[in-house]
Amino acid sequence: MKKIVTVEATPNIAVVKYWGKRDESLILPTNSSISMTVDSLKTRTSVMFDPSLKKDEFWLNGKKVDLDKNPEAKERLKQLEVIRKRARITHHARIVSINGFPTAAGFASSASGLAALAVAASKAAGLKLDTKQLSILARLGSGSASRSVMGGFVEWQKGEKADGSDSHAIQLANHQHWPQMRLVSAVVNAGKKKLSSRAGMKQTIATSALYRARLEHHLPKVVPEMRRAIAHKDFATFADITMRESNSLHSVMADTWPPIHYMNDASREIVALVHELNEKAGHTIAAYTFDAGPNAHIYTLAQNVDKVKRMLKQVKAVKKVVVSKPGPGPVELTKPTDHLIDPETGRVRKHSFNEKRQEIIVRR
Ligand code: DP6
Protein backbone atom coordinates (compact mmCIF):
# COMPACT_ATOMS: atom_id res chain seq x y z
CA MET A 1 0.00 0.00 0.00
CA LYS A 2 1.42 3.35 -1.02
CA LYS A 3 0.89 6.49 0.99
CA ILE A 4 -1.17 8.90 -1.08
CA VAL A 5 -2.48 12.22 0.19
CA THR A 6 -5.24 13.95 -1.75
CA VAL A 7 -6.35 17.52 -1.12
CA GLU A 8 -8.82 19.88 -2.75
CA ALA A 9 -8.19 23.62 -2.59
CA THR A 10 -9.94 26.62 -4.11
CA PRO A 11 -8.86 30.00 -5.50
CA ASN A 12 -9.10 33.33 -3.75
CA ILE A 13 -9.98 36.70 -5.20
CA ALA A 14 -8.15 39.66 -3.72
CA VAL A 15 -9.89 42.82 -2.58
CA VAL A 16 -6.56 44.45 -1.71
CA LYS A 17 -4.23 43.35 -4.46
CA TYR A 18 -0.72 41.95 -4.45
CA TRP A 19 1.32 43.43 -7.29
CA GLY A 20 5.08 43.63 -6.89
CA LYS A 21 7.85 41.62 -5.26
CA ARG A 22 10.72 42.74 -3.09
CA ASP A 23 12.35 39.32 -3.57
CA GLU A 24 11.75 37.45 -6.80
CA SER A 25 13.12 34.12 -5.72
CA LEU A 26 11.41 33.77 -2.32
CA ILE A 27 8.31 35.58 -3.63
CA LEU A 28 8.19 38.29 -1.01
CA PRO A 29 5.69 41.04 -1.77
CA THR A 30 6.06 44.81 -1.49
CA ASN A 31 2.66 45.07 0.18
CA SER A 32 0.18 43.11 2.26
CA SER A 33 -2.94 41.91 0.46
CA ILE A 34 -6.43 40.71 1.45
CA SER A 35 -8.71 38.21 -0.25
CA MET A 36 -11.65 35.86 0.12
CA THR A 37 -11.17 32.15 -0.50
CA VAL A 38 -14.12 30.82 -2.51
CA ASP A 39 -15.98 27.52 -2.20
CA SER A 40 -16.05 26.63 -5.91
CA LEU A 41 -13.53 26.06 -8.73
CA LYS A 42 -11.70 23.30 -6.87
CA THR A 43 -8.32 21.87 -7.79
CA ARG A 44 -7.74 18.29 -6.63
CA THR A 45 -4.15 17.15 -6.11
CA SER A 46 -2.80 13.74 -5.09
CA VAL A 47 0.82 13.32 -4.01
CA MET A 48 2.96 10.24 -3.41
CA PHE A 49 6.67 10.15 -2.51
CA ASP A 50 8.16 6.95 -3.82
CA PRO A 51 11.71 5.53 -3.77
CA SER A 52 11.16 3.91 -7.17
CA LEU A 53 10.72 7.27 -8.96
CA LYS A 54 13.81 8.54 -10.81
CA LYS A 55 12.60 12.14 -10.83
CA ASP A 56 9.63 14.26 -9.83
CA GLU A 57 6.59 13.72 -12.00
CA PHE A 58 3.78 16.19 -12.54
CA TRP A 59 0.45 15.49 -14.22
CA LEU A 60 -1.93 18.34 -14.91
CA ASN A 61 -5.47 17.79 -16.18
CA GLY A 62 -4.69 14.28 -17.34
CA LYS A 63 -1.44 15.09 -19.14
CA LYS A 64 2.11 14.55 -18.00
CA VAL A 65 4.10 17.79 -17.93
CA ASP A 66 7.72 17.40 -19.02
CA LEU A 67 9.46 19.27 -16.21
CA ASP A 68 12.81 19.26 -18.03
CA LYS A 69 11.26 21.16 -20.90
CA ASN A 70 9.11 23.40 -18.73
CA PRO A 71 11.34 25.43 -16.41
CA GLU A 72 8.40 27.58 -15.29
CA ALA A 73 6.46 24.57 -13.99
CA LYS A 74 9.63 23.25 -12.33
CA GLU A 75 10.23 26.60 -10.65
CA ARG A 76 6.67 26.60 -9.31
CA LEU A 77 7.22 23.19 -7.72
CA LYS A 78 10.24 24.29 -5.74
CA GLN A 79 8.38 23.82 -2.46
CA LEU A 80 9.10 20.10 -2.96
CA GLU A 81 12.79 20.70 -2.18
CA VAL A 82 11.90 22.51 1.03
CA ILE A 83 9.51 19.70 2.03
CA ARG A 84 12.11 16.99 1.35
CA LYS A 85 14.75 18.82 3.31
CA ARG A 86 12.48 19.36 6.26
CA ALA A 87 11.18 15.77 6.23
CA ARG A 88 14.72 14.45 5.68
CA ILE A 89 13.71 12.35 2.70
CA THR A 90 15.24 12.11 -0.75
CA HIS A 91 12.41 10.33 -2.61
CA HIS A 92 10.90 11.90 -5.65
CA ALA A 93 7.23 12.73 -5.89
CA ARG A 94 4.40 11.84 -8.24
CA ILE A 95 1.98 14.76 -8.31
CA VAL A 96 -1.35 14.45 -10.08
CA SER A 97 -3.55 17.52 -10.27
CA ILE A 98 -6.84 18.31 -11.97
CA ASN A 99 -9.01 21.38 -12.03
CA GLY A 100 -12.69 20.86 -11.31
CA PHE A 101 -13.53 23.53 -13.87
CA PRO A 102 -12.66 24.02 -17.54
CA THR A 103 -9.02 25.12 -17.72
CA ALA A 104 -9.67 27.28 -20.75
CA ALA A 105 -12.42 29.23 -18.96
CA GLY A 106 -10.01 31.90 -17.87
CA PHE A 107 -10.06 31.17 -14.15
CA ALA A 108 -6.65 31.26 -12.55
CA SER A 109 -5.75 27.90 -11.06
CA SER A 110 -2.26 28.59 -9.75
CA ALA A 111 -3.46 29.70 -6.30
CA SER A 112 -5.69 26.66 -5.73
CA GLY A 113 -3.17 24.29 -7.33
CA LEU A 114 -0.17 25.40 -5.32
CA ALA A 115 -2.14 25.57 -2.08
CA ALA A 116 -3.41 22.01 -2.64
CA LEU A 117 0.16 20.91 -3.36
CA ALA A 118 1.56 22.46 -0.17
CA VAL A 119 -1.03 20.71 1.99
CA ALA A 120 -0.90 17.35 0.17
CA ALA A 121 2.88 17.13 -0.36
CA SER A 122 3.85 18.14 3.18
CA LYS A 123 1.46 15.57 4.60
CA ALA A 124 2.59 12.87 2.15
CA ALA A 125 6.16 13.52 3.32
CA GLY A 126 5.08 12.94 6.90
CA LEU A 127 5.22 16.57 8.01
CA LYS A 128 2.60 18.13 10.26
CA LEU A 129 2.64 21.80 9.38
CA ASP A 130 0.47 24.63 10.67
CA THR A 131 -1.31 27.04 8.33
CA LYS A 132 1.48 29.61 8.64
CA GLN A 133 4.08 27.11 7.46
CA LEU A 134 1.77 25.88 4.71
CA SER A 135 1.23 29.43 3.56
CA ILE A 136 4.99 29.98 3.29
CA LEU A 137 5.36 26.78 1.25
CA ALA A 138 2.52 27.68 -1.13
CA ARG A 139 3.98 31.18 -1.49
CA LEU A 140 7.16 29.73 -3.00
CA GLY A 141 5.13 28.59 -6.00
CA SER A 142 2.91 31.62 -6.43
CA GLY A 143 2.33 34.61 -4.18
CA SER A 144 -1.45 34.50 -4.28
CA ALA A 145 -1.38 30.77 -3.37
CA SER A 146 -0.17 31.76 0.12
CA ARG A 147 -3.73 33.03 0.76
CA SER A 148 -5.53 29.87 -0.48
CA VAL A 149 -4.24 27.62 2.32
CA MET A 150 -6.89 29.22 4.54
CA GLY A 151 -10.62 29.68 4.16
CA GLY A 152 -12.79 32.75 4.56
CA PHE A 153 -11.16 36.18 4.61
CA VAL A 154 -7.40 36.14 4.56
CA GLU A 155 -4.56 38.65 4.78
CA TRP A 156 -1.12 37.88 3.37
CA GLN A 157 1.14 39.89 5.63
CA LYS A 158 4.08 41.09 3.63
CA GLY A 159 6.60 40.65 6.43
CA GLU A 160 9.91 42.42 6.83
CA LYS A 161 12.52 39.68 7.10
CA ALA A 162 14.85 38.83 4.23
CA ASP A 163 14.33 35.07 4.66
CA GLY A 164 10.53 35.37 4.23
CA SER A 165 9.77 33.66 7.54
CA ASP A 166 7.26 36.40 8.45
CA SER A 167 5.65 36.68 5.00
CA HIS A 168 2.56 34.48 5.22
CA ALA A 169 -1.19 34.56 5.39
CA ILE A 170 -3.35 34.88 8.48
CA GLN A 171 -7.08 34.30 8.65
CA LEU A 172 -9.03 37.49 9.35
CA ALA A 173 -12.38 35.68 9.62
CA ASN A 174 -13.48 32.15 8.77
CA HIS A 175 -15.94 31.20 6.02
CA GLN A 176 -18.93 31.34 8.36
CA HIS A 177 -18.28 34.89 9.47
CA TRP A 178 -20.12 36.59 6.60
CA PRO A 179 -22.44 33.91 5.18
CA GLN A 180 -24.32 36.31 2.90
CA MET A 181 -21.20 37.23 0.96
CA ARG A 182 -21.14 36.09 -2.68
CA LEU A 183 -18.70 36.38 -5.54
CA VAL A 184 -20.20 36.44 -9.02
CA SER A 185 -17.47 35.71 -11.56
CA ALA A 186 -18.09 36.50 -15.21
CA VAL A 187 -15.91 34.92 -17.87
CA VAL A 188 -15.56 37.37 -20.72
CA ASN A 189 -12.64 35.84 -22.53
CA ALA A 190 -11.44 32.27 -22.49
CA GLY A 191 -8.09 33.07 -24.08
CA LYS A 192 -4.74 32.61 -22.37
CA LYS A 193 -3.37 35.87 -21.00
CA LYS A 194 -0.63 37.54 -22.99
CA LEU A 195 1.57 38.66 -20.15
CA SER A 196 1.90 36.68 -16.91
CA SER A 197 1.34 38.44 -13.58
CA ARG A 198 4.92 37.55 -12.74
CA ALA A 199 6.36 39.41 -15.73
CA GLY A 200 3.80 42.21 -15.49
CA MET A 201 4.48 43.13 -11.87
CA LYS A 202 8.22 43.10 -12.47
CA GLN A 203 7.77 45.57 -15.29
CA THR A 204 5.53 47.79 -13.12
CA ILE A 205 8.10 48.03 -10.30
CA ALA A 206 10.81 48.93 -12.78
CA THR A 207 8.94 51.63 -14.67
CA SER A 208 5.87 53.07 -12.93
CA ALA A 209 6.09 56.20 -10.79
CA LEU A 210 2.41 55.86 -9.92
CA TYR A 211 3.23 52.50 -8.36
CA ARG A 212 5.33 54.25 -5.69
CA ALA A 213 2.39 56.47 -4.80
CA ARG A 214 0.16 53.38 -4.54
CA LEU A 215 2.67 51.74 -2.23
CA GLU A 216 3.42 54.74 -0.05
CA HIS A 217 0.09 56.56 0.17
CA HIS A 218 -2.79 54.35 -0.93
CA LEU A 219 -2.08 50.86 0.46
CA PRO A 220 -1.10 51.73 4.06
CA LYS A 221 -4.54 53.31 4.40
CA VAL A 222 -6.69 50.67 2.72
CA VAL A 223 -5.29 47.56 4.42
CA PRO A 224 -6.52 48.50 7.93
CA GLU A 225 -9.75 49.93 6.49
CA MET A 226 -10.47 46.65 4.71
CA ARG A 227 -9.72 44.64 7.86
CA ARG A 228 -12.26 46.77 9.71
CA ALA A 229 -14.90 46.48 6.96
CA ILE A 230 -14.61 42.68 7.05
CA ALA A 231 -14.73 42.51 10.86
CA HIS A 232 -17.89 44.67 10.93
CA LYS A 233 -19.45 43.11 7.80
CA ASP A 234 -19.71 46.63 6.45
CA PHE A 235 -20.52 45.91 2.81
CA ALA A 236 -20.56 49.54 1.61
CA THR A 237 -16.99 50.15 2.83
CA PHE A 238 -15.84 46.69 1.68
CA ALA A 239 -17.27 47.37 -1.79
CA ASP A 240 -15.88 50.87 -2.04
CA ILE A 241 -12.34 49.80 -1.18
CA THR A 242 -12.59 46.76 -3.48
CA MET A 243 -13.52 48.83 -6.53
CA ARG A 244 -11.02 51.61 -5.83
CA GLU A 245 -8.32 49.03 -5.22
CA SER A 246 -8.98 47.32 -8.53
CA ASN A 247 -8.93 50.71 -10.25
CA SER A 248 -5.66 51.61 -8.51
CA LEU A 249 -4.08 48.33 -9.63
CA HIS A 250 -5.15 48.75 -13.24
CA SER A 251 -3.99 52.38 -13.22
CA VAL A 252 -0.45 51.40 -12.24
CA MET A 253 -0.59 48.71 -14.90
CA ALA A 254 -1.48 51.37 -17.47
CA ASP A 255 1.31 53.57 -16.08
CA THR A 256 3.82 50.75 -16.63
CA TRP A 257 6.15 51.13 -19.60
CA PRO A 258 5.28 49.65 -22.05
CA PRO A 259 1.72 49.86 -20.69
CA ILE A 260 -0.11 46.72 -19.54
CA HIS A 261 -3.81 46.30 -20.26
CA TYR A 262 -5.53 43.24 -18.90
CA MET A 263 -9.05 44.71 -18.90
CA ASN A 264 -10.89 44.92 -22.20
CA ASP A 265 -14.03 46.65 -23.52
CA ALA A 266 -16.30 44.07 -21.89
CA SER A 267 -14.53 44.60 -18.53
CA ARG A 268 -15.05 48.34 -18.81
CA GLU A 269 -18.68 47.84 -19.80
CA ILE A 270 -19.15 45.83 -16.58
CA VAL A 271 -17.50 48.59 -14.52
CA ALA A 272 -19.98 51.13 -15.88
CA LEU A 273 -22.94 48.78 -15.33
CA VAL A 274 -21.98 48.12 -11.69
CA HIS A 275 -21.82 51.86 -10.99
CA GLU A 276 -25.22 52.24 -12.68
CA LEU A 277 -26.66 49.37 -10.62
CA ASN A 278 -25.42 50.93 -7.39
CA GLU A 279 -26.77 54.31 -8.35
CA LYS A 280 -30.19 52.86 -9.14
CA ALA A 281 -30.23 50.96 -5.85
CA GLY A 282 -29.43 54.18 -3.99
CA HIS A 283 -26.52 52.49 -2.19
CA THR A 284 -23.66 50.15 -2.98
CA ILE A 285 -24.87 46.61 -3.63
CA ALA A 286 -22.10 45.32 -5.90
CA ALA A 287 -18.33 45.74 -6.27
CA TYR A 288 -16.21 44.71 -9.25
CA THR A 289 -12.60 43.63 -9.12
CA PHE A 290 -10.23 42.52 -11.90
CA ASP A 291 -6.94 40.60 -11.74
CA ALA A 292 -4.42 40.00 -14.51
CA GLY A 293 -7.14 39.32 -17.07
CA PRO A 294 -10.43 40.67 -18.42
CA ASN A 295 -12.78 38.48 -16.32
CA ALA A 296 -14.93 40.36 -13.83
CA HIS A 297 -15.34 39.25 -10.24
CA ILE A 298 -18.27 40.94 -8.56
CA TYR A 299 -18.70 40.85 -4.80
CA THR A 300 -22.29 41.21 -3.66
CA LEU A 301 -24.64 39.92 -0.93
CA ALA A 302 -26.92 36.88 -1.40
CA GLN A 303 -30.06 39.01 -1.78
CA ASN A 304 -28.55 40.87 -4.75
CA VAL A 305 -27.09 37.99 -6.75
CA ASP A 306 -30.05 37.89 -9.17
CA LYS A 307 -29.73 41.61 -9.87
CA VAL A 308 -26.04 41.18 -10.65
CA LYS A 309 -26.76 38.19 -12.89
CA ARG A 310 -29.45 40.16 -14.77
CA MET A 311 -27.00 43.00 -15.21
CA LEU A 312 -24.39 40.63 -16.66
CA LYS A 313 -26.96 39.30 -19.16
CA GLN A 314 -26.75 42.69 -20.89
CA VAL A 315 -23.06 42.16 -21.65
CA LYS A 316 -22.73 40.23 -24.90
CA ALA A 317 -19.16 39.15 -24.24
CA VAL A 318 -20.05 37.35 -20.97
CA LYS A 319 -19.84 33.63 -21.72
CA LYS A 320 -20.26 32.06 -18.32
CA VAL A 321 -21.16 33.11 -14.80
CA VAL A 322 -20.11 31.29 -11.61
CA VAL A 323 -21.46 32.20 -8.17
CA SER A 324 -19.29 31.37 -5.14
CA LYS A 325 -19.56 31.72 -1.38
CA PRO A 326 -16.79 32.08 1.18
CA GLY A 327 -15.03 28.70 1.21
CA PRO A 328 -13.49 26.68 4.07
CA GLY A 329 -10.02 26.37 2.52
CA PRO A 330 -8.19 23.15 1.61
CA VAL A 331 -9.90 19.87 2.48
CA GLU A 332 -8.24 16.47 2.57
CA LEU A 333 -10.12 13.67 0.79
CA THR A 334 -9.58 10.42 2.62
CA LYS A 335 -11.83 8.04 0.65
CA PRO A 336 -9.41 5.75 -1.24
CA THR A 337 -11.57 6.06 -4.38
CA ASP A 338 -10.98 9.84 -4.48
CA HIS A 339 -7.20 9.54 -4.98
CA LEU A 340 -5.89 10.34 -8.46
CA ILE A 341 -3.12 7.79 -7.79
CA ASP A 342 -3.92 4.13 -7.16
CA PRO A 343 -2.81 3.28 -3.59
CA GLU A 344 -2.22 -0.36 -4.59
CA THR A 345 -0.01 0.17 -7.62
CA GLY A 346 1.11 3.80 -7.29
CA ARG A 347 -0.03 4.39 -10.89
CA VAL A 348 -1.95 7.39 -12.13
CA ARG A 349 -5.63 6.57 -12.37
CA LYS A 350 -7.69 7.60 -15.36
CA HIS A 351 -9.42 10.81 -14.38
CA SER A 352 -11.28 13.67 -16.00
CA PHE A 353 -13.54 16.60 -15.32
CA ASN A 354 -17.14 16.10 -16.36
CA GLU A 355 -18.42 19.55 -17.28
CA LYS A 356 -22.09 18.58 -17.38
CA ARG A 357 -22.02 17.07 -13.90
CA GLN A 358 -19.44 19.62 -12.70
CA GLU A 359 -17.58 16.73 -11.15
CA ILE A 360 -14.12 15.18 -11.13
CA ILE A 361 -14.45 11.54 -12.23
CA VAL A 362 -11.78 9.03 -11.12
CA ARG A 363 -11.76 5.56 -12.68
CA ARG A 364 -10.50 2.61 -10.68
C1 DP6 B 1 -3.43 40.44 -9.91
O1 DP6 B 1 0.21 35.20 -7.43
O2 DP6 B 1 -0.18 34.96 -9.90
O3 DP6 B 1 -4.09 38.32 -9.05
O4 DP6 B 1 3.53 35.39 -7.28
O5 DP6 B 1 4.30 35.78 -9.60
O6 DP6 B 1 2.95 33.76 -9.08
P1 DP6 B 1 3.24 35.21 -8.73
O7 DP6 B 1 1.93 36.04 -9.07
P2 DP6 B 1 0.39 35.74 -8.78
O8 DP6 B 1 -0.18 37.24 -8.86
C2 DP6 B 1 -1.50 37.56 -8.57
C3 DP6 B 1 -1.76 38.97 -8.87
C4 DP6 B 1 -3.22 39.40 -8.82
C5 DP6 B 1 -3.53 40.08 -7.49
C6 DP6 B 1 -3.76 39.20 -6.28
O9 DP6 B 1 -4.22 38.06 -6.41
O10 DP6 B 1 -3.51 39.71 -5.18
Image (cartoon, helix red, strand yellow):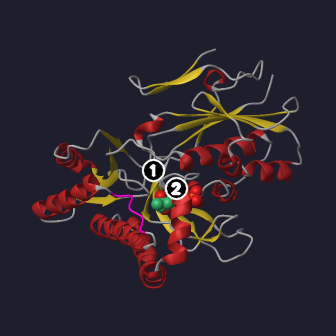
The single residue placed furthest to the front in the displayed view is 258
Relative to 221, is 164 on the left or the right? right
| Picture quarter with the C terminus | top right
Q: Which mark is residue 193?
A: 1
Residue at x 50% of width, y 38% of height: 42
Q: Which residue is mark 2?
A: 196
Residue 310 in percent (x, y) is at 17, 44
* Residue type, numbered disc 2: Ser
Provide the residue span drawn in magenta. Answer: 259-263
Is residue 260 rendered magenta in the image? yes
Q: Residues within 10 Å of mark 2 (few under 14, many from 20)?
A: few
Mark 2: C-beta under 8 Å from nearest atom of ligand 1: yes
Tell me if 233 is positioned left or right of 27 in this view.
left
Is 108 rendered above or below residue 36? above
Work out whether residue 149 can be spotted: yes
The x, y position of residue 146, in whole percent, is 60, 57
Q: Pointer 2 and pointer 1: residues touching (CB < 8 Å)?
A: yes
Q: Residue at x 55, y 76 (%)?
A: 206
Rendered image quadrant of residue 133? bottom right
356 with respect to 32 (left or right)? left
Task: Write down the quadrant of residue 219 in the picture.
Answer: bottom left
The residue under the point 85% across, 52% down is: 85
